[in-house]
Image (cartoon, rainbow, N blue to C red):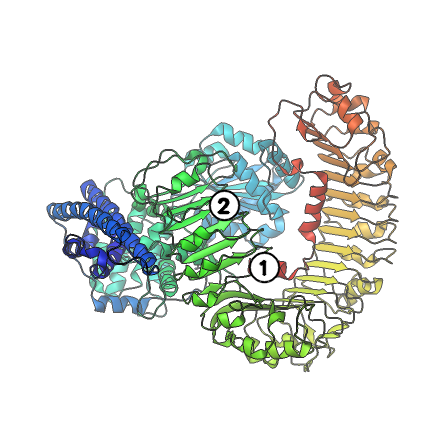
Amino acid sequence: MADALLGILIQNLGSFVQEEFATYLGVGELTQSLSRKLTLIRAVLKDAEKKQITNDAVKEWLQQLIDAAYVIDDILDECSITLRAHGDNKRITRFHPMKILARRNIGKRMKEVAKKIDDIAEERMKFGLQQFAVTEERQRRDDEWRQTTSAVTEPKVYGRDKDKEQIVEFLLRHASESEELSVYSIVGHGGYGKTTLAQMVFNDESVKTHFDLKIWVCVSDDFSMMKVLESIIEDTIGKNPNLSSLESMRKKVQEILQNKRYLLVLDDVWSEDQEKWNKFKSSLQHGKKGASILVTTRLDIVASIMGTSDAHHLASLSDDDIWSLFKQQAFVANREERAELVAIGKKLVRKCVGSPLAAKVLGSSLCFTSDEHQWISVLESEFWSLPEVDPIMSALRLSYFNLKLSLRPCFTFCAVFPKDYEMVKENLIQLWMANGLVTSRGNLQMEHVGNEVWNELYQRSLFEEVKSDFVGNITFKMHDFVHDLAVSIMGDECISSDASNLTNLSIRVHHISLFDKKFRYDYMIPFQKFDSLRTFLEYKPPSKNLDVFLSTTSLRALHTKSHRLSSSNLMHLRYLELSSCDFITLPGSVCRLQKLQTLKLEKCHHLSDFPKQFTKLKDLRHLMIKNCSSLKSTPFKIGELTCLKTLTIFIVGSKTGFGLAELHNLQLGGKLHIKGLQKVSIEEDARKANLIGKKDLNRLYLSWGDYTNSQVSSIHAEQVIETLEPHSGLKSFGLQGYMGAHFPHWMRNTSILKGLVSIILYDCKNCRQIPPFGKLPCLTFLSVSRMRDLKYIDDSLYEPTTEKAFTSLKKFTLADLPNLERVLKVEGVEMLQQLLKLAITDVPKLALQSLPSMESLYASRGNEELLKSIFYNNCNEDVASRGIAGNNLKSLWISGFKELKELPVELSTLSALEFLRIDLCDELESFSEHLLQGLSSLRNLYVSSCNKFKSLSEGIKHLTCLETLKILFCKQIVFPHNMNSLTSLRELRLSDCNENILDGIEGIPSLKRLCLFDFHSRTSLPDCLGAMTSLQVLEISPLFSSSSKLSSLPDNFQQLQNLQKLRICGCPKLEKRCKRGIGEDWHKIAHIPEVELNYKLQSDAEPTISEDKKPASTQYSDIMFDFVVKQDFDNIIEDIDV
């Protein structure tokens, strides 16, 4: 950290000498002296950083140096800001009182800090620190070995095959015979590969087949029952459950695990609390025979506390395996294995004590040099002999000190994030930039330098679990040991904490991140005045004293949900991220942040426009706007911000300063969505956008809006889009509202579009033909909507015997295409063999061929013929290929088939189907028993708004896996008499149905949650309700009507001893009878821990904020939103950009 900071200071001091501030009372001479002393100090930093590990006095000296350097940096930054501000004001001359006062203040502060540097420079002499210098030759050799690729490859795993076989054998044989929940622990030292081994087991094909459900939870240091339960739910249902009471979380987990043979991996467990584990384990007892937990831990006592079986102790790897792993990292890219380096390497691996992490990191660090002397210096390093230091940490420290000085602060900065945090590469680089850890170098922009730094740290195995999406957005994590190393080096300089656990902060802290899953709005930050706080990332509701806190800082990076910002306090900011703020116009104070490089605005739903002074942000490089739905315009004359590299949204305006010409000289990259193209009247205006020259763009979206007040015809639209040709490196492209009759020539040129992975065509209503997208080799997502005259998705010529179409497509959305007949005009061509998800809305004439890999299908507003074409002949294995839905289909939603009287019997062949939803099918009356008999894997069944639907039929007895049943707005339905056969049913939701349907719920054996909405005429609940002793949650309320006539509870209601929550809303008579202590029915419900009447808590339980707390109408909206196929262009873009 110190070397990078001093390098910047020395450079900036040289510039400062020439500024007028340096003319005050000899400050210039003082500055030159300061620069010389910092240069001398910098020469010994490499030795000092090593010696601080064993010498506390050197460590303290380094900390004092960093503190003083930050102060100098703040002074110089303030000078630069003041000079720029004064320079913009012609009335402020050299002898203006404001300038005289500013020079005096700067001079005084410089003298104070110079005295500190004098003392620090003098003190260095007593430590005997040696001078080092990085030669140009050494730098050149390092650069030669730098690998800048961002490709993500999993390394080969050495020496763990037998361990894997033993654990798989236990899970598939011994555990499967156990009536009790089996717990098996993998125990081993840190860095021995416990997590890697667990991942190998988790992804083993036989394990996948054996278990109904697999769940992975990273526990880490804090074994919070709440946190682990939430992770189980989120891993299973794919979203945060938003439950804040432990009881509601526990019940949800029980519902998920009920009657399933599940495998739960608890990775990296540390807690030795027996009572906490017993409570947690009690929540997991509802699985089927063979359900198992696999634990990884460093501690035998944890395995003893948690386990019912013998632990699997992970031995160190053999020298041969360690050598293979080390060699894989150290001799990359067919690099010559020189005999002398091999000899040294084999000695080094013996020092790794069998740790794959140590071998991997050490080998990676040495792959950057072929200098034999450097390999020897690592072998003979004093770190191997440090007392009371883990040899693995010794290896990691060696790798750290083998980093170039410029890389070290970038690595240690990652300590600002908590363990197991998934970091975003682009975001991290922007934070590095904000803190001055990476700067431009020669012709290389600072973002490219940051990318080089990240790649080198990755190549040195300091980052792991790297994931890349189709446009190259990268996320990653750090191994716990590597994170520990970064934290240990940063010491008091960096804090990452849950807000509720934060105590008084050190005056030396420079970087803070706060997290708070409890979302407390009354929290206050404990603080004192800081010497120089640089980073504050608040991933929580804003603290009450945030304004006061920020007034004492000299921040470079800030993330907050508060918009009460003062530019005078935040003048040093380079990075500002504002989310969920309620301003309409961006605050003017932001426009006075002269040094701002990155501005991110997310979920600011009221934001409409920007102040005119926005162009004062001359250093701005990234303006990223996301989910700001009310935005009407982008900044005035944004083309003046010539440093801008990212502009996610540009809205064309009709006034000067808002036209496409503003984009001409901007070298933009990443995502660009141009809106309002109907306001472009001539093609010359569009040509000025210069899209073809923006080589770093990878996502481009073009939108035309309302043509009502536009002077542009469809011919003009064609001329405009022809001049908006992009470069050939795009990954994602979309058009919205295009009014031309023909797509531009460049869209038919496959050499320009060959790299596209995603294409969206939305509301291009005048086009009858689509370019030959079926020939694009990389296309994985295609969405085509609102093209009334389109007959074929691709009408180009194919040779059926040799050519295939849409070979990589995985997700396909078709909507509002009334005349679409086929995907390809040419018949008999193999296509869509990789397709996983298909959504069809209002495409009545479409005929499809076999899609054997499809897992999810949404079909809406079609006819019965479409459904028959989807499932035709699937029941006959000999001709199964003639139907499109194969046996991989897991999710099916059929909506709006108005004339459909019965579901095709071919659906009964969908043995893998887990989710089935039917709605808005007015003629549908029932499900046949034959149909239900084949749906052996069905877990969720949802029937809504089918006016003639009368019965599920006796065939419901075959749905032995059914967990959730929801029937809404089906006024004729009655339940069959065998509802007691639904042994797995946990949740039943009924709304606005036949009043007598409640008489059919008797006997459901394991029901946990019952929701009754809109039973308008019913005055009492059935007596059978009191016999449903498994019930835990009961909710009674109107969904769309104003109130209910319900006036009493059954006399046997007290038998519901397991009922934990009762909510009654919109039932005034019943609410009156249930009032605490005075209601006539209070004695029937007094035993229930949580009773709510019209959302007011009646019992002694603490109120919870959970999904149970939401009004019924909100719950229904959430259900709809979870599965609806989004038709809004902006939402489609956000979905594929995630």
Give the residue drawn at x 85%, y 29%: 1019
- Name the one closer to the observer, 368 or 15: 15
> Which label number is shown at residue 561?
2
- Name the one closer to the observer, 538 or 1048: 538
Q: Is residue 772 visible?
A: no
Please tell me whether mark 1 sits on a helix, a strand or a loop.
Answer: loop
Total numbered badges shown on the rendered structure? 2
- The residue labelled by disc 1 is 632
Classify 1066 as above or below 455. Answer: above
Residue 905 screen position, x and y as percent: 83, 57
Residue 73 screen position, x and y as percent: 27, 52
**26 on left or right of 750:** left
Mark 1 or 2: in front is 1
Give the residue drawn at x 74%, y 18%: 1083
Residue 22 screen position, x and y as percent: 20, 56
Amino acid type, residue under disc 2 in the picture: Lys
Q: Quadrant of the C terminus?
A: bottom right
- Name the one closer to the observer, 272 or 13: 13
How busy is the neighbourhood of tag 2: few (under 14 within 10 Å), some, or many (20 plus)?
many
Classify 716 as above or below 396. Answer: below
- Name the one closer to the observer, 982 or 457: 457
